[in-house]
Amino acid sequence: MAQTQHGNAPIPASGAWTPDQPAGNRRFHRFATTRPFSLEGGGQLSDVTTAYETWGELDAAASNAVLVCHAWTGDSHAAGPAGPGHPTPGWWEGLIGAGKPIDTDRYFVVCANVLGGCQGTTGPASPDPSDGRPYALRFPVVTIRDMVRAQALLADSLGITRWRAVVGGSMGGMQVLEWGVMFPQRVGAIVPIATCVEASAQQIAWGSIGRRALLMDPKWNDGDYYGADDDEGPWHGLAVARMIAQVTFRTDNKFSERFGRRLANKNFHDDGLDLLSKFEVEGYLDHHGDRLVRRFDANSYLYIGKAMDLHDVGRGRGGVARAMSRITAPSLTIGISSDILYPAYQQETIHAHITNGDARNRYVEIESDEGHDGFLIATQQVGAELSAFLSGPG
Amino acid sequence: MAQTQHGNAPIPASGAWTPDQPAGNRRFHRFATTRPFSLEGGGQLSDVTTAYETWGELDAAASNAVLVCHAWTGDSHAAGPAGPGHPTPGWWEGLIGAGKPIDTDRYFVVCANVLGGCQGTTGPASPDPSDGRPYALRFPVVTIRDMVRAQALLADSLGITRWRAVVGGSMGGMQVLEWGVMFPQRVGAIVPIATCVEASAQQIAWGSIGRRALLMDPKWNDGDYYGADDDEGPWHGLAVARMIAQVTFRTDNKFSERFGRRLANKNFHDDGLDLLSKFEVEGYLDHHGDRLVRRFDANSYLYIGKAMDLHDVGRGRGGVARAMSRITAPSLTIGISSDILYPAYQQETIHAHITNGDARNRYVEIESDEGHDGFLIATQQVGAELSAFLSGPG
């Protein structure tokens, strides 16, 4: 099993632009700040690097920038082809590009890897400046608010005082809501998709069981596995955690349609059956678990999962309703009808709490049987709503 | 952590009644057969012991016997107080007893621990007669049909040629359906609750992830952990498997209502927060995981889980519809409105496939937000339907 990519390149000078691989209108940069960065949970990082990609051109007034926020195991590669460090095309390829709903002929689109991540932004796999060794569990707990404040520093460095829109699904949608609440003047519109104002007990339960599975893997070694050989990391634990998540991302219907009860390699009556023989759906889960292991750092998985569990826009702000009342931007809230992880009622709750009276506020429930992953898969329906919303006055 | 109870008492003589602890109308017996018992999957057991409990008295015509079938981690203790070997009262205490829906003044009620179990019936923890050591993974794969055939042997030994009714929820309901299909002449009525004609891909997915977590525990040791000290069994793996199941047994609503977002021992802003601090719902899951570990054998968990995944009344019978057409008994099928694991549509499928034309066939969806566990918790609603159904002609 291949080892997780967790090496960060050397940190460039504070605030510097460092285009690693210019390719047409697509750019890949790192932005670093060496000012101490204080975290909501009480910790501090003495320097922070943010890896991000951009598409399109920022206009002279810096008024056409759209921030796209990624989900749990996503990264900055929201659009563009597969390539070094990106085994697959962009995760929102259907939505971002020339003439697409997030139109790169019109907008300057930015997507940054989150704080705590492992695709170039500072996270538990990054070297701790105190000794140059990976932080591992010395990394402080980060929250969605910390991720957003890191993105705000990036916006400052790009000269963007106000986003035309901030858009994202799942954990990306949590960031969208925090942008609306923390920086009302800096967002022209918000599009939270398949997300929530606060993680529910069931969401916490799923996340926590995945973490417990990962922690149980002896090769996790209290988070200190970075020097390990390819076969010596907590890959089994990470795979089990991912498999749990993968079921919650999809639906009963889709699984039945796609896999039914087919056995992977056997026929019950012809071959007999042993305890460990598998159904096709089990092979699918193995595949998803193993695929994540090849590209994601196990400790990042823990820290980002914890950040989602801690997501609560009302914390320290007198509750959800008061927090959400800070949102001044017009909003498009999108739910997926079959989502079992972030059910449509949570999207209705978001919409109900946006009380700025803007006539453009809108809630749409998309009919799709793709489950939570509908926000990544049902791009035509999501895109149609997004186009209509963004083409209005911003 | 306490060790799983997995010792079986010595096997009594074939077919003998062995009342271990007579207490009023409640009896606790073991029944053993030393004839070879061939299994659907191709294996064979050279002897089988079935542990069971009974309540009430069998009438002279042996016409008043009701078989209650237990679920995954249940056992024969469907009713009665806690006691040695039974840390809790019966799991259907609200339904079984004098004057209760399954009225022990009227019926002779039988509940047997399933084949592959660990509460007295032969399972992977039982001694393999070839060397006296626990079978562990040498135990053959068992199916729901094998469990039912073991129960049929028990019925023979009790002189019961026909059950007045066979009743059960979840995996118990799978046995109910197989009784109806395999032995139409031996069942006077069937009551499948919160179950299915065949395990769906999503159900298989959940079961399989739990098993993978258990197999990942190094202390599982390829199933060979029976000589281990209390602290040396695969208790962490079993606990994680159970935690996954526990979430699927309940509902988003119930979790939110009961736990919300309360932290177990901390306050975010007062105490700071570390990666491993817990929400209350996490403590609840830990509790459920650890409680199962104290009473259940990890290998039994694997084998019984596999039996559920393999459940398919249509296998080798020309499909589900043809198999279900063998059912002649009147049926009461019960679904729980909020069940996410065995959704109501699966109960409608059962009901739709019972084509014997009996006017007493009935499907009821119980309104309850307890989720799958509603079959254990909503005993008043289940009981009312059961009473009405059983009081009709049988």
Image (cartoon, coloured by chain):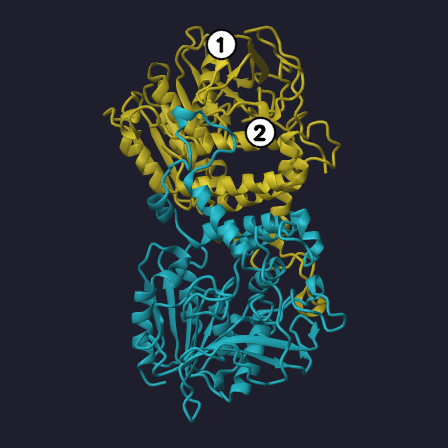
Chain colours: A cyan, B yellow
Q: Is residue B257 visible?
A: no
Circle 2 residue: B300
Residue B48: x %, y % from top left? 55, 14
Q: Residue at x 59, y 56 (%)?
A: A3
What amino acid does circle 2 point to? Ser
Which image quarter: residue A150?
bottom right
Closest to the camera, between mark 2 and mark 1, is 2
Type of amino acid under label 1: Leu
Mark number displayed over residue A378: none
Q: Is B261 located above or below residue B198 in the figure?
A: below
Above or below: residue B286 compared with residue B138: below
Q: Are marks 2 and 1 in contact (CB under 8 Å)?
A: no
Q: Earlier in the sequence, mark 2 or mark 1?
A: 1
Secondary structure beneath label 2: helix
- Residue A10 sits above or below residue B92 on the image: below
Taking the spot 30% from the left edge, 33% from the top edge, the residue there is: B351
Looking at the image, which is closer to me, B128 or B275? B128
Q: Nearer the viewer, residue A136 or A140?
A: A136
Q: Is residue B388 left or right of residue B107?
A: left
Reading the image, the residue beneath label 1 is B158
Percent from the top left, x then y, of residue B126? 62, 20
Q: Secondary structure at mark 1?
A: helix
Of residues B230 and A70, which is closer to you in this image?
A: A70
The answer to whether residue B300 shows anywhere in this view is: yes
Quarter of image, res B61: top left
